[in-house]
Structure formats: C-alpha cells, structure tokens
C-alpha cells in the first residue's frame, strides 16, 4: 500500500472527479459512513456525539457523520469553528442535508457557541472534523479554541482523516493538536501516521476504502507500507534438496570483553532466520561466550587490544573474505581508536554485501568510509543524528526526509529504526514497516535485527529488500513475543527464538518463503 502526501491526496481527489467522474459528494458520503462505522464500534449501544467541524471538506465529512449518527438514534450536536458564509460549497451542501434531517448545528458566531464548546465534557465521544490533510500554518482563532476545548474535555476523540493540528507530511504539531483515540483516514495512509507527534496523536488508525479508483491508489509514490504478503513474496525459497551451503555463509564481526552478548545475539538472529553457516569473528572472551550459547556457530579468533579487536585483525578477516556471502560489522565492538582503525583497513578492501550497525556506525560518523560493497546502514535515531550531524529531535520530526538525506550522503541502503522503521535506497521507494511494538525498546534487539539482515543478504536478496524483509520479520517476532510472553519484559533472546514461528506465520502455506509447492503431512 503506497503512502500519500498531502499533495498526492489532493491529486487523487481531483483525478477521481476529473478522470473517473466520481462526484466529490459521493466520496464525502462514503468518508462519513466509514467514520460513523468506527463510531458504532466504539459506542455499539449509541450515545451522545459532539461533531466539531471546520469550514472545509473535512467539516463536510463531519456533517455527514452527524447526519448518519442522528438517523441511527445518537444524540448529536454539530459545532462549527467558522461562520456559515465561510463554508466551502461541498461542506455547505452537506450542512443543508444534515440540517434538513434535524441535526442541531451551531456556528462560531452564534451566542450559544462558546458555552456549548465549554460543555464538551458531557458527551460520550467527540468527532474531530476541524482540519484536513491540507493544513500547514500554525492553528489560530476559532479552530485553536476548539482544539483546546477538545483537549480539556477528557472525552475520547475519533478524527476524520487526520487529527486537527497535525501536519500531514511531517507529523509535526501546528501549535496545538487533537489527541485522537481513533483516526480513520481515506484511500491511502499518510506520512503523519509514521513520524513526529502524529504517530502518537492518531491513536489507533485505519485506512477506509471510500471508492477511489484502484488505478489511482496503485500509482507509485516515494514510500509504501509493506505487508506480510509483500515480504512472503521476497523471502528466499527453501528447496527440499538444499543443503547448508545453499543458504549463505555469514560472517559476524562483533563483541568485546565489555559486550560479549552482542555477538551472541547477532549470531542467534542470523541462525534463527535461516543462514546456512554463521561464523563469529572476535576476541577470545567473546568467542567463549558464543561457544557456550550458540554452539551452531563457528569461530574465527582475532587478536585483541585492551579487550577489543586489534587493528592487525584486518588481515585475518580479509584473508577469509571469499569464504563468506555476507557480513555484519558492529555490535559491541566499542568506540576505541584501534577498532576504528581495524574497520578502516577491512572496509577499504571489503567486497561482500554487509550490514553496518552499532559501534561500526559510530566509526562511520567519525570519518571511516563505508565499504564500497553493497551495504545496509542500520541506525537508531541517536546514531542517525551522529551520521547526519543533527539532533535526535531533527531526525524524528521528519523521518522520511532524514532517510532520504542519509541515502544521498552515504549512497547505500539505510534502515532508520524505531516505531515504523523506514528503509531507503538509491533510486528505490522508501519502505515502511508496520510490525513491532513498544516492548522491543530494550537492549539487544538491534543486534538480532542485524543478524537477520545479514542472513538475507547471504541468501542473495538485494540490500533494499533484505533490510525491508528483515525489519518486518523481526517486528513480527516481537509481536509474537508480546502475545506469548508479555507486552513488556521479553528479551532479545526471546525474540530471536520467535523468528522461525514468525516466518511460518508470514508464509503460512509452506513456511518457506515464496515457494508455492504443497507440503505433505
């Protein structure tokens, strides 16, 4: 499913009418019906609704909701943060129908308006139809007063298309905004759902089909939301006659005396996601930890300096590089100068697809050049801030722009981690994840993810698809842990153990990626 900016959303509206002959009134009716159906899910026994409308077409959708609720027996009051003369023609048409059906509507210039706005706490649900996806400037005047009243009321809110006061393309707050319990957006998801304050303010969201032609919705934009089906069609096929050499030999360069567990977790991630062979290259203490926890991994001892990998270890790695199909560099390596020198020596000659994570990313931010091989960078917002010399706040306020900037600077695939992780690559649309949960915000999760990406690179997926499939699969394993263990408190090791079951759920027919042959009992 493609993600539509405010501009693209307006274009879809226009083309639906001009090219396909669908009247705006029809789309407005369907939008209002979709929102009303969400209201019925929240209030199956009915109740009292306050529908707050603006002067634009978002307000017109609100008038449709008010009319449908009134016809269904709800108590309904429409409050309009504008005068009747300010309404768009489409909104005015819907007001006329709503009023004819007996819905009480009070405008901003009515003497009763301020008192009714003050009394919103007496309603069961508020419907937010004040501002649509085209809002840009700071919220002011009657709309700002209405948003403030909604916030003070303590009443749950259903937002129409977007919570009022949120910028559609960045998710930033336009001075003040509505915090919705539920948001119903139309046609395609919008960027605000995945970043900035919009990510939280939208609450539980859904995309309603209101009759936009499929040809318009299928037209590519610069970002898309990936799904189980998208991932299942790209995961490597597992043939019955295959052997371990067919499924990639992965090198993991990770760990130090202070952080031996990072290598363990990365190895578990690679093995649990189907790598044929996994070799951990590190200092002796790390290899002892790996041998005790992951006996399936082979070991490549490296010389050490103060408990971390020494620069002369580069020769050992480069001497064995033809043995491996892909590599992961970074988890637990430390920030030491010798480690940076080690990475610099290796990467100048490294030719295999690789993942650069954690401490290796910090080396990049301090001037070590990214390998010329096909590479995936996997920063969290703090690491991305160092890579782009920006604050975390700047990174998070427009994550799509951030990924574009990082791809341009480093000329490789970039996976920006976090809620709704984003993958970007040169000349490819950005891919947005929708799996995962807040319980994954704990140490070691990224190490497992790095192992999964490396395993997929080792099985010949290109970096763009390997990163996207891995983030979706990794998040799905986290969701399984949240269901089976608890929403908070499960560990990175739990997630690694859940990877095979998560893959089976993504590919329910066979559990073997895009293989469509039948299984036998």
Image (cartoon, rainbow, N blue to C red):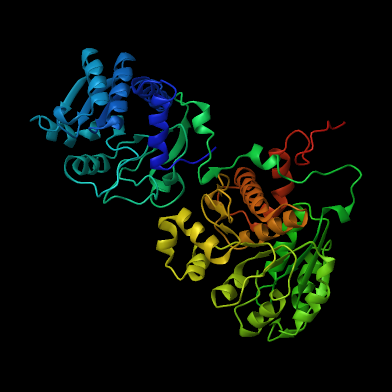
Work out which quarter of the rendered image holds the C terminus and state it.
Answer: top right
Image point 17% across, 37% down: which residue?
118
| Residue 455 occupies quadrant | bottom right
Which residue: 30% across, 34% down? Answer: 128
Pick the residue in front: 205 or 444.
205
Percent of width and height locating residue 199: 43, 47
Place residue 48 in its image quadrant. top left
Q: Residue extending furthest right? A: 241
In the image, residue 77 above or below residue 444: above
Question: Which one is nearer the viewer's eye here, 244 or 135?
Answer: 135
- In the picture provided, is 422 more to the left or to the right than 267? left
Q: Specify whether residue 301 is in view.
A: no
Report the residue that reaches farthest toward the left: 111
Residue 373 in sight in this render: yes
Q: Position of residue 184 (x, y in %)?
A: 41, 33
Q: Quadrant of the N terminus?
A: top right
> Would you say 346 lies left or right of 395 here?
right
Would residue 154 appear left or right of 413 to someone viewing this image? left
Q: Residue 344 is drawn in which quadrant?
A: bottom right
Nearer to us in this view, 277 or 412:
412
């Amino acid at each position: 499913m493609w993600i539509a900016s405010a501009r693209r959303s307006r274009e879809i509206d226009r083309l639906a009418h001009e090219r396909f002959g669908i009247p705006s009134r029809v789309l407005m009716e369907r939008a209002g019906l979709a929102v009303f159906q969400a209201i019925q899910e929240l209030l199956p026994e009915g109740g009292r609704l306050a529908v707050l409308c603006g002067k634009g077409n978002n307000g017109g959708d609100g008038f449709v909701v008010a009319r449908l609720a009134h016809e269904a027996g709800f108590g309904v009051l429409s409050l309009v943060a504008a005068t009747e003369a300010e309404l768009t023609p489409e909104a005015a048409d819907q007001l006329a129908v709503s009023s004819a059906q007996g819905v009480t509507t009070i405008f901003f210039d009515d003497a009763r308006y301020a008192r009714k706005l003050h009394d919103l706490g007496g309603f069961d649900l508020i419907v937010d139809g004040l501002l649509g996806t085209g809002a840009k400037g700071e919220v002011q005047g009657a709309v700002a007063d209405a948003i403030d009243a909604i916030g003070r009321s303590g009443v749950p809110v259903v937002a129409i298309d977007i919570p009022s006061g949120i910028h559609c393309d960045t998710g930033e707050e336009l001075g003040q905004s509505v915090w919705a319990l539920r948001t119903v957006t139309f046609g395609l998801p919008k960027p605000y759902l995945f970043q900035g304050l919009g990510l939280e303010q939208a609450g539980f969201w859904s995309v309603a089909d209101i009759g936009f032609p499929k040809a318009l919705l299928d037209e590519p934009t610069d970002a898309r939301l990936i799904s189980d089906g998208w991932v299942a069609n790209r995961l490597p096929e597992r043939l019955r006659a295959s052997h371990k050499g067919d499924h990639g030999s992965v090198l993991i360069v990770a760990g130090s005396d202070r952080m031996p567990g990072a290598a363990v977790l990365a190895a578990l991630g690679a093995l649990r996601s189907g790598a044929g062979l996994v070799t951990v290259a590190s200092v002796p203490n790390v290899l002892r930890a790996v041998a005790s926890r992951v006996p399936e991994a082979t070991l490549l001892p490296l010389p050490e300096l103060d408990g971390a990998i020494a620069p002369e270890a580069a020769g050992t790695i480069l001497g064995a590089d033809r043995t491996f199909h892909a590599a992961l560099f970074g988890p637990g390596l430390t920030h030491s100068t010798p480690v940076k020198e080690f990475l610099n020596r290796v990467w100048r000659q490294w030719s295999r697809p690789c993942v650069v994570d954690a401490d290796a990313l910090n080396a990049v931010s301090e001037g070590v050049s990214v390998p010329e091989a096909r590479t995936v960078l996997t920063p969290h917002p703090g690491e991305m801030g160092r890579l782009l010399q920006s604050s975390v706040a700047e990174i998070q306020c427009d994550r799509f722009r951030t990924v574009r900037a990082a791809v341009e600077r480093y000329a490789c695939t970039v996976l920006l981690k976090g809620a709704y992780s984003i993958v970007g690559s040169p000349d490819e649309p950005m891919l947005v994840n929708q799996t995962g949960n807040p319980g994954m915000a704990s140490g070691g999760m990224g190490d497992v993810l790095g192992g999964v990406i490396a395993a997929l690179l080792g099985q010949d997926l290109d970096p763009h698809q390997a990163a996207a499939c891995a983030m979706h699969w990794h998040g799905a394993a986290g969701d399984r842990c949240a269901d089976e263990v608890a929403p908070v408190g499960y560990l990175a090791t739990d997630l690694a153990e859940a990877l095979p079951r998560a893959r089976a759920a993504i590919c329910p027919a066979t559990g073997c990626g895009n293989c469509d042959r039948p299984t036998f009992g």
